Amino acid sequence: MNDTPRIRTVVSCTFLAVTVTAGATACAGSEDHHPLSTRPYDAARQVSFSAPADGRKADPDKALEITAKGSDGRITDVTAVDAAGHHLAGELTADGQRWRSTGSLTAGARYTVKVATEDADGAPGTRTFTFETAPAKRSLTVEFGPEAGKYGVGQPITADLSLPVKDRKSRAVVERALKVRSTPSVEGSWHWVDDEKLHYRPKEYWPAGAVISATANLAGVKVGDKLYGGESEPLKLTIGDRIEAVADAGSHYMTVRRNGEVINTIPVTTGKPGFSTRNGIKVVLGKEYFVRMRGTSVGIAAGSSESYDLPVYYATRVTWSGEYVHAAPWSVGSHGVANVSHGCVGMSTGNAAWFYETVRPGDIVKTINSYGDTMDTFGNGFGDWNLPWDKWRKGSALVEPAQSAANPPDPTRLRPSI
């Protein structure tokens, strides 16, 4: 027999964490123990397993160990695979006396383990057993957004976690399990907004007509200390035409394009000094036929010269703090001429109705040449596209240490302005 020390390592196909609980079930082997037999003998008496017997389930936080009994034989190879086809990584000692898992077991999984041995004369043996791991006591689930449906080319995918994930290594486990697929395919990346939320966007806008799916392959995966992934519902979206509206606060006109072709040019008014409209790219959040807008909701004192209380129609929302594209018949004389609003993009009732019927959530509304600040990246709608791609990628746990670009929402600003 060759006494040269050897180490065998079983390579895992996936990097998953799991719990182990199990009852070992032996598979019958050959009764022929002749050293020259071509059929492997049953190695039941030659190896022992750490997985519990009597139908009990293994603790997924504990490693699986397989040990050779006595000195008249050795373990030559071990494969451990769960029902989903995931291989459990492990390492065999140089003397072939012990194999120990190095990868994490999957929680709530059923494993099949095959052990190859040889006796003192070099004859091959085999042993197969199965066991189950206990389900996780703490589960991390994912809720994807937005709701299934048809959206514009600027719509990010969101992932809300049921529990906070702060550790970078744990974040990487989660991110590897969150899959976004697009037809046609695009380059994209997740970005951690905070400990409980991620956004996904492509490098460029989604292609018009794209079909997008988001799935979480986290079930049973070890995320962190005694924390495992749970089942999550997948998401499917479709993308419509590429609608882009650019409001120029300098020229007081909005240009609307469909798939690159200008389909309308609309005279508008934007925010006046002190209430300048935010510059940058915003994404349509929703549409409201009627909104009551009050100055007090954005901190304007009742009775002051800036106070207002108006019924507003055909309101297309672009920020949670109350920036809309809407009908403003009271300022029609300023449309195309001057900026007189309190931050919204105002236009005639007819033009606002056309815009309302033309756009959908996810479409792009961009403001340029305003004296206002740039749209927040997060916290006040979807300002995701204002972050350059290289900085966006830094928000991924799989790239390099993320620099948070999150801007938490100010609850005093989450009211409509005109």
Image (cartoon, rainbow, N blue to C red):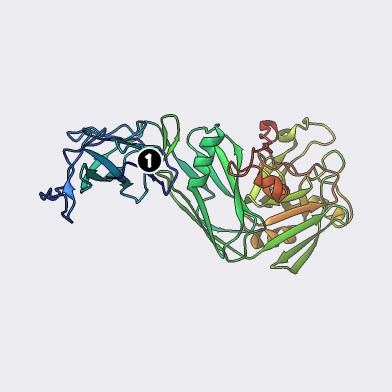
Front residue (pair 119, 17): 119
Above or below 8: residue 289: below
Residue name at image x 77 percent, y 57 percent: 246
Q: In which quarter of the image is the C terminus?
A: top right
Secondary structure of the residue carrying numbered label 1 = strand
Residue name at image x 50 percent, y 38 percent: 161
Rendering coords of residue 201 (x, y %): 62, 52
Rendering coords of residue 218 (x, y %): 43, 44
Q: Which amino acid does label 1 sit on?
A: Gly
Residue name at image x 35 percent, y 31 percent: 62
Could you tell whether 198 is left or right of 279 in the image?
left
Q: Is residue 79 visible?
A: yes
Above or below 187: residue 92: above
Front residue (pair 378, 284): 378
Q: Callout 1: few (<14), some (14-19), or many (20+) C-alpha neighbours within 10 Å?
A: many
Front residue (pair 83, 367): 83
Residue name at image x 88 percent, y 57 percent: 251
Q: Is residue 348 visible?
A: no
Q: How many labels does the image show?
A: 1
Could you tell whether 9 is left or right of 273 in the image?
left
Residue indicated by mark 1: 90
Q: Quadrant of the N terminus?
A: top left
Rendering coords of residue 301 (x, y %): 78, 30
Front residue (pair 44, 267): 44
Rendering coords of residue 57 (x, y %): 25, 34
Could you tell whether 178 is left or right of 78 in the image?
right
